[in-house]
Amino acid sequence: MVNKRKTRTFSIKKAATIRQVAEMAGVSIATVSRVFAGSDLVSHELVERVQEASRSLSYQPNRIARNLRTQKTHTAAVMVSDIENPFFTSVIRGAGGVLRNAGYTLLLTNSDENEQIELELLLNLRAEGVAGVILAPTHEDAQHYEQFIQAGLVIVAIDRCPKDLKIDRVTVNNIEGAQTAVRHLVEQGHTKIGFITGLPRISTAYERLQGFEQAMKIHNLPLNPQWVQQGDFRRENGFTAMMNILNLEDRPTAVITSNNLMTLGALQAIYECKLRIPDDMAIVGFDDMAWATSLNPPLTTIAQPAHELGMSAAQLLLNRINDPQRPYRHVILDTQLIVRESSGMHYALEKD
Amino acid sequence: MVNKRKTRTFSIKKAATIRQVAEMAGVSIATVSRVFAGSDLVSHELVERVQEASRSLSYQPNRIARNLRTQKTHTAAVMVSDIENPFFTSVIRGAGGVLRNAGYTLLLTNSDENEQIELELLLNLRAEGVAGVILAPTHEDAQHYEQFIQAGLVIVAIDRCPKDLKIDRVTVNNIEGAQTAVRHLVEQGHTKIGFITGLPRISTAYERLQGFEQAMKIHNLPLNPQWVQQGDFRRENGFTAMMNILNLEDRPTAVITSNNLMTLGALQAIYECKLRIPDDMAIVGFDDMAWATSLNPPLTTIAQPAHELGMSAAQLLLNRINDPQRPYRHVILDTQLIVRESSGMHYALEKD
DNA sequence: GTGAAAGCGCTAACAA
DNA sequence: TTGTTAGCGCTTTCAC
């Protein structure tokens, strides 16, 4: 007796193939392929028959097969170091827009600021055959990335960037940004200015600190080493860094934080100490975020053109894919000072 | 005469193929394949020779070819409606983690709350052969998604969800969340409570409003229709909605906002009117965000388990992929009230 | 244990 | 203008 298992009462329709369409339309698969490639060598009549058949089978060309055959994909990856940081989210959105318009699919990966993960992911992306990757490198060692470049992986570096690497890159003018922040604070009457910096191994952190120090020198301002506190671009460290500054005997009247997350921590510290902004402590943050205007008082920031940064990077990637020989380019985007209330006038000296 | 074009002076190393490895190791391609599949049918010696050859050619199996051959991919997509919303970012991160651990690559797409784009993207994903997609649907019409389900695309709905759709889903207990917010405010002495809601066509918005109204009834509180203002989950509308409330003759003493972005707008409105929180206007927001503790005063919120939501969705997706026949599941996650200072005690009535 | 060979769905070169 | 066919790089029977 046959042991007849109950068969599924419904069956998952497998996607139609080019062969089925060809058969249904009574043409060869080459013709179907041509129709979908938009070739104008096909007669009106056949085009219509093919389209009709495709519609009724709801046929979509299989991208995997196409990719294998043509040896290229229309997939581009973006690899950031912290997907929950709104700065990177804006970058992703900017890049995603232009990539999608160019017909590319967006692969997203998150290195979590961990170079081991970054390495694995890069390997993965290569195997996946991505057309290119927009990368926020976890560290500054060119060696790390050399093998991928050699292997023909198209990389565009954003935000931070190893020197001596033959790739396209787009960064922000961090030095000038930090200088602008100092100048603004000086104009508000501040002379004692503190700085919360990120890990020095990351170029953005390093450059912002550098810009700060240069500006202090330019303005002939004293710089107490204790006024510069080291964070790591994360919220918790912004908090402790600001706490350290607040506990100083001789503390600055204003502080510049070098990224958005640390700004959040710093603000919390100020509030917890029941200090008023900007009277007791003025603050200028790096990165303009959606919440900056909703703070009390609204936050003065050095805005980074995150969106634009993503768009530029995507454009560079596209250009490179279309012309691998073109000269490498380094796009530097300017920051913008957005004055709100957290950096308000300082009269303390006069009052003293 | 031959028109000899100048050839490139350098050549991009093409990735090594299984054939080259086989040749170098002096084995058949089947053996190489077996080694990479971890088959234990291969002798020690050959395994080593293959590994050696692979290393020296830095060979990685071509995923595209593998996918074509096996008719499946290890790529999963997440499609959100606003990638710049931190809520979704957390979801993505949660999902990304478990997906990556399971060996999947994450494809990210952004429907921008636009159903036309959503449709195109879904079509794309199907052609791309993704193993499944975690989707925050743009609208509630099951019809819209039916064709994809029919075509065998594995979908897990998150956050919002069309009814009558045979799919897995994970949502948040919005009704209870809104009720909790009301109860908390009542405990703080508030009796006149306003609500800023989202577009009613989105189930989360609808449910939260519903929860609010039910709770008001339960607590026997009067509900002035003007106290409920309609927004659209975006910042700008949170601002105008709150402004509308603030301009009311008879205005509530506390307001609940039904998502994070609108909270930001509402806060800005309150600050611009020089009102104090919570004395002049108490506020409870939906969605707990990094900046909630850095506000002045810190914000009381109904926290959504965004991270967990992403993880659950990814888990459901994985389970479904491994066993397409399993019964569909609807996971409902609880919200959590996080009391900070923006919802503080209300003594106004006593003082009157 | 190992290898030969078929074939996944498609594109593109060539033939007709 | 249309069709035939080779083959992209891999996995997986099947035979030895």
Image: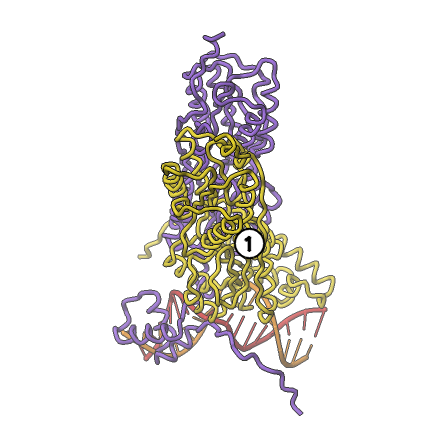
Chain colours: A purple, B yellow, C red, D orange
Q: Position of residue B94 (x, y in %)?
A: 57, 50
Q: Which residue is mark 1?
A: B173
Q: Is residue B170 left or right of residue A180?
A: right
Look at 46% across and 35% down and name the residue there. Answer: B281
Res D11 → quadrant: bottom right
In which quadrant of the rendered view does residue A28 lie? bottom left
Q: How many marks?
A: 1
Question: Taking B64 as reference, is B301 above or below it?
Answer: above
Closest to the observer: A16 or A131? A16
Residue A139, percent from left and from top: 56, 37
- Dot 1 falls on a residue whose secondary structure is loop
Relative depth, front residue between A256 and A76: A256
Query: Could you tell me which residue is drawn at 46 percent across and 61 percent down?
Result: B125
Tell which subunit mark 1 falls on. B
- One can see residue B234 in this view: yes
Image height of A72 relative to A251, above or below: below
Tell me which amino acid carries mark 1: Asn
Q: Position of residue B112 (x, y in %)?
A: 40, 51
Task: Reply above or below: B186 against B296.
Answer: below
Query: Could you say where residue B80 lies in the image, as x and y percent from the top left?
Result: 47, 53
Q: Residue furthest bottom?
A: A1
Q: In what quadrant of the picture does the N terminus of chain A appear? A: bottom right
Residue situated furthest left in the rendering: A44
Task: Please rate how many residues cluster around mark 1, counting C-alpha atoms within 10 Å: few if below 14, some from 14 to 19, many from 20.
Answer: many
Residue B57 shows in the view: no
A208 vs A275, nearest the viewer: A275
